[in-house]
Image: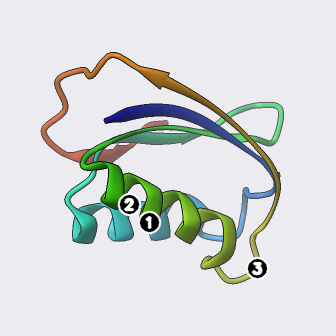
Amino acid sequence: MQVHIIFKGIVQGVGFRERTRRMARSLNVFGWIRNNPDGTVEAIFKGSPESVEKLIQYCENGIPDAIVTEKIMEYQEEGNFEDFKILK
């Protein structure tokens, strides 16, 4: 399963990308995450449905100091990812 997701709220400057990368790697989820100029965080998560759902829940509720007020998700055809990276 692969999902493109945008998180809105207080999601920049709180360690969101690094914590998400660590959790993604522990859950065997691949893809990438990056900050957008508009203050949102954008990501692609690819993995088993259970692992992707756990990572989304972690992003919404498990990152200290982050407050996700909205998420926009779109399921996609799976791409070829071998790691989980933070993009600049």
What amino acid is labelled 1 in the image? Lys
Using the numbered discs, state the Cα–Cα distance from disc 1 to disc 3 in whole angstroms: 19 Å
Q: Earlier in the sequence, mark 1 or mark 3?
A: 1
Name the image colouring. rainbow
Q: Is residue 66 above or below residue 76?
A: below
Q: Are marks 1 and 2 in contact (CB under 8 Å)?
A: no
Please give the name of the residue rendered at 54% of the width and 70% of the height, measured from the top-left corner. 58
Q: Earlier in the sequence, mark 1 or mark 2?
A: 2
Using the numbered discs, state the Cα–Cα distance from disc 2 to disc 3 in whole angstroms: 17 Å
- State the mark number for residue 44: none
Q: Is residue 38 above or below residue 22?
A: above
Q: Residues within 10 Å of mark 1 (few under 14, many from 20)?
A: some
In-image side of 87 versus 13 (left or right): left
Using the numbered discs, state the Cα–Cα distance from disc 1 to disc 2 in whole angstroms: 13 Å
Image location (x, y in percent) of residue 42: 60, 36
Q: Is residue 52 above or below residue 77?
A: below
Residue 13 location, quadrant: bottom right
- State the mark number for residue 54: 1
Q: Are marks 1 and 3 in contact (CB under 8 Å)?
A: no
| Quadrant position of the N terminus in the picture | top left
Q: Are marks 2 and 3 in contact (CB under 8 Å)?
A: no
What amino acid is labelled 2 in the image? Arg
- State the mark number for residue 65: 3
